[in-house]
Amino acid sequence: MRKLAVLALALGVSALGLTDASARMRYVTIGTGGVTGVYYPTGGAISKMVNKKRKEYNLRVTVESTAGSVFNVNAIMNGDLEFGIVQSDRQYQAWNGLAEWQGKPQKKLRAVFSIHPESVTLVAAVDAGIKTIYDLKGKTVNIGNPGSGQRQNSIDALAAAGIDWQKDIRAEGLKAAEAPGMLQDGRIDAFFYTVGHPSGAIKEATAGARKVRFVEIPAEVVKKLTEKYPYYAASKIPVEFYPGAENKEDVPTFGVKATFCTSIDVPEDIVYAITKEVFENFDEFKKLHPAYKVLTKESMLEGLSAPLHPGAEKYFREVGLLK
Ligand code: GLU
């Protein structure tokens, strides 16, 4: 009898122990992109802000390198990831049931906020003789891995330039982290990457022995794209970050925005906590990557297609960013 009581007491104590902060710690993961992109450090920046308060929120945010935007949407939808960074055009397509989600709108997808601008970046070897997008015909070009955001951007840009990616080029489906090395090794002539600047991948591609240039997406092609698709806008690649590239002036192209996404199934208080920590520490957050230089709090509510998650909406209403 006495033994049982002691056992119960011991169990009681350990049950109580379970209610302390460490036992209730909740873990969420942000899906990003390749480690030499901007999504990966962005996931790191967001997690850094939130993990400072992990005891207060009982929340620990971790970051995972992934195949990119399309992978992230799908992983959020099937519950493998709680959060992901997703190109604004991909968010639009997932929500509306287009492209990879043709006829299958992802109605549980929710927007949290948008982040840095991303430019469709076409990098080509100078010795391959590629001066314009039209010169890609007959060349070996990495259009991006399945699961990446850039793959469809490459296909759209090529199509608008009258180039059939399946017939007119030798299209490769490499991950963005592999493309710079393949270009430097002479295994490909050019690659597309939709990414914020500066990015490690583009630094790697422009700093090698094989000379490279950014190839402009000409105005007539950008015009076709922006007229046809609501989510594309004209943009420029800032060459200041890449002294090894042949270009001396910023390079016209088109682009989208990186956005932070989640699922309606992720608890409101978790989304609220993350939104609050990023916005309350906005100046500190902005210092974590040069691609955030252009960010304003207001701009971070633009470019979202899926409905705001209630946790984000709650915070934005509290501080008057949403009326
Ligand atoms: N935009 C790319 C994608 O959606 C990722 C870029 C990055 O990792 O910075 O796949």
Image (cartoon, helix red, strand yellow):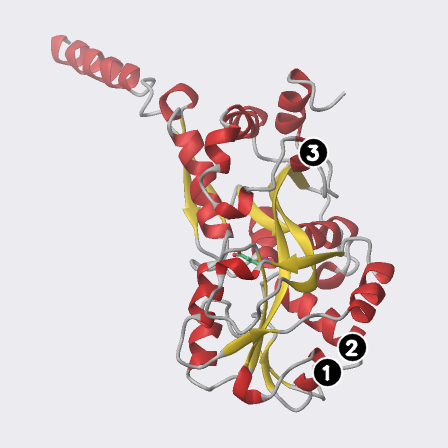
Residues at marks 3 and 1 touching, judged by CB atoms closer than 8 Å:
no
Can residue 271 be seen here? The reply is yes
Give the secondary structure at mark 2. loop
Quadrant in the picture for residue 293: top right
Residues at marks 2 and 1 touching, judged by CB atoms closer than 8 Å:
yes
- Residue picked out by circle 3: 308
In front here: 23 or 200? 200
In this view, 154 is above or below 278: below
Quarter of the displayed picture in which ligand 1 can be seen: bottom right
Q: Amino acid at mark 3?
A: Leu
Residue at 73% in and 41% down = 306
In this view, 2 is above or below 102: above
In front here: 138 or 30? 138
Q: Amino acid at mark 1?
A: Tyr
Q: Amino acid at mark 2?
A: Ala
Q: Residue most toward the bottom?
A: 138
Crowd class of label 2 (few under 14; some 14 to 19; many from 20; radius 10 Å): some
Q: Separation of disc 2 and disc 3 at Cα?
A: 35 Å
Can residue 178 be seen here? The reply is no
- Residue picked out by circle 2: 161
Viewport quadrant of the N terminus: top left
Residue 285 percent location from the top left of the image? 48, 34
Residue 9 percent location from the top left of the image? 20, 11
- Choose the circle earlier in sequence order: 3 or 1: 1
Residue at 62% in and 22% down = 315
Q: Separation of disc 3 and disc 1 at Cα?
A: 40 Å
- Residue picked out by circle 1: 134
Residue at 68% in and 71% down = 216
Viewport quadrant of the C terminus: top right
In front here: 12 or 301? 301
